Amino acid sequence: MAYYSTNEFKGGLKIMIDGDPCAIIENEFVKPGKGQAFVRAKIRNLKTGRVVERTYKSGESLEAADVMDVDLQYLYTDGEFWHFMDPQSFEQQAASAEAVGDAVKWLKEQDMCEVTLWNGTPLAVTPPNFVMLAVADTDPGVRGDTSGGGGKPATLETGAVVRVPLFIDIGETLKIDTRTGEYVGRAKD
Amino acid sequence: MQPHQDWRPTASFDTLRLRAELLARIRAFFTAREVLEVDTPALSCAASTDPALESFSTLYNGPVLAGASLYLHTSPEFPMKRLLAAGSGSIYQLCKVFRDGEFGARHNPEFTLLEWYRTGFDHLDLMDEVEQLLTAVLANIAPLGPVHHWTYRELFLQYASIDPFTVSPGEIQVLLQAGHNISCAALSADDLDGWLDLVMTHLIEPQLGAGLVFVRDYPVSQAALARLRPGTPPVAARFEVYLNGIELANGFYELADAVEQRARFEKELERRRNSGLTAVSLDERLLSALDSGLPDCAGVALGVDRLVMIASGAGSLHDVIAFPFDIS
């Protein structure tokens, strides 16, 4: 089993805490002139997304988490699992609803996603920063209104609901920023 | 070979000029008070036995001490006490000191220390002088803010609702976890000083805020070079200085008893052995100097880089040292 000393701590390092894989966000060396040296770390639990603070004695060792990020192509869902494939090796991975989390509303077949694997199993899915999705339902478009003011809700093909300008019609393909969930523009043909 | 992109200083020239000004004011302060500037070896035959300090060591090759292990000093305390015992009178020193393993926003393994000893002073007199020095050195540069005096016990009661002289490590663990979401699983259940350090650094220091804070009367286990003051419980005549919540200086009413000092060093060596730390040799010349008679004196060491950091409003030592050790 691999271990990291606190001397190796840095942002992004993956370690096991209470049985869960976690990533260090930031860490700080704290020591009174005549006393115990500590390393204080802000850590994200990769399973729950929760951020916790932990303090370690300087020099202490922690178990490394076997976590890596891979780029996989989203294939389909069978309702229980979301299936991804490595386009080079054709190796497939099945991600649970828990692992897919909020990414589910942006997942479109054939899109490349970043999948975080823990001990070889999907732990989290990050959609591309920008996705192109068709409008499945919205109020009829108001022609000529390019003011950008106001706006209306539109339901996209994946089920996500985003706020779009008044002129958008059903069937149009839109570019969406998945990090903010905001409409960026119409897809260029 | 690729050119290094990080060859430039990390401190601005404004900050380096401020640093030079502070050093000049420090020297003027002591010159006016007729305290002698001294220069003692950075490379020593003996090291600090303090389990909280790791000395860098190196090998000497040449005449006289061929093959000897030498240590970079963690503070100039021992040779300065030898000067005092030899009759120097009050002395000060500005020098680089070295502490292995310490690096962060407030630590650099090599840093500038101001250390001074005043004969005929006790720790209370010296605390007054620290305040006078900071007032003089920071005048028209940074306001000193309000000044507060606490005993270690009062400070813990005020900011952590803990009596450090009666609390158990287990009670601290529960209080920090339940009340403040602070935990350190690897601290052992019998390491009371470690737990008190955790309270100090994680809970109390962040609450100190702007201004100058003096803390005195430490647990005897936290002051291997200070005199003890009898009482219930007895306390060590040690003080710490915090400026704007940052630990800046540490002082003692100096222990002059060679027999007691040897016993404390040996206790520290035992703690080093038990914690798996490097064994170091005792400074026998210091003990001989104490045995011949150390004048009644108090001494204090002040981190100059941190002082520059506070004076310049910087958030990290990185911004006040020309070349931090990782680009040295």
Image (tube, coloured by chain):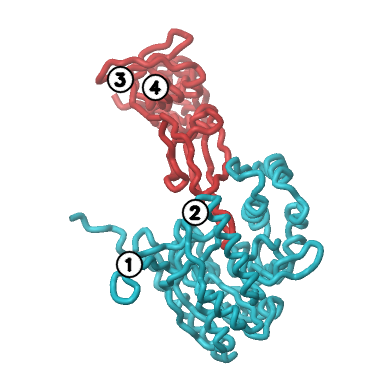
Which badge, 1 or 2, comes first in the chain's sequence? 1
Whether discs 1 and 4 lie on one chain: the answer is no
Q: Can residue A122 be seen in this view?
A: yes
| Chain letter for mark 2 | B
Mark 3 surroundings: few (<14), some (14-19) or many (≥20) residues within 10 A: some
Residue to which mark 3 is pinned: A86
Q: Toward which corner of the image does residue B242 lie, by quadrant? A: bottom right
Spatial CA distance of label 4 from label 3 is 13 Å
Give amino acid for label 2: Leu
Q: In this view, does A81 lie to the left or right of B188?
A: left
Mark 2 surroundings: few (<14), some (14-19) or many (≥20) residues within 10 A: some
The spot of residue A169 in percent (x, y) is: 43, 19
Mark closer to the observer (3, 2): 2
Q: Is residue A15 left or right of residue B172?
A: left
As rendered, which of B30 and A107 lies closer to the eye?
B30
The residue positioned 28% from the left and 73% from the top of the image is B62
Residue to which mark 4 is pinned: A120
> Which residue occupies the extreme right position in the image?
B232
Mark closer to the observer (4, 3): 4
| Chain letter for mark 4 | A
Q: What element carries label 4?
A: loop
Q: The red chain is which one?
A: A
As rendered, which of B165 and B6 lies closer to the eye?
B165
Spatial CA distance of label 2 from label 4 is 39 Å
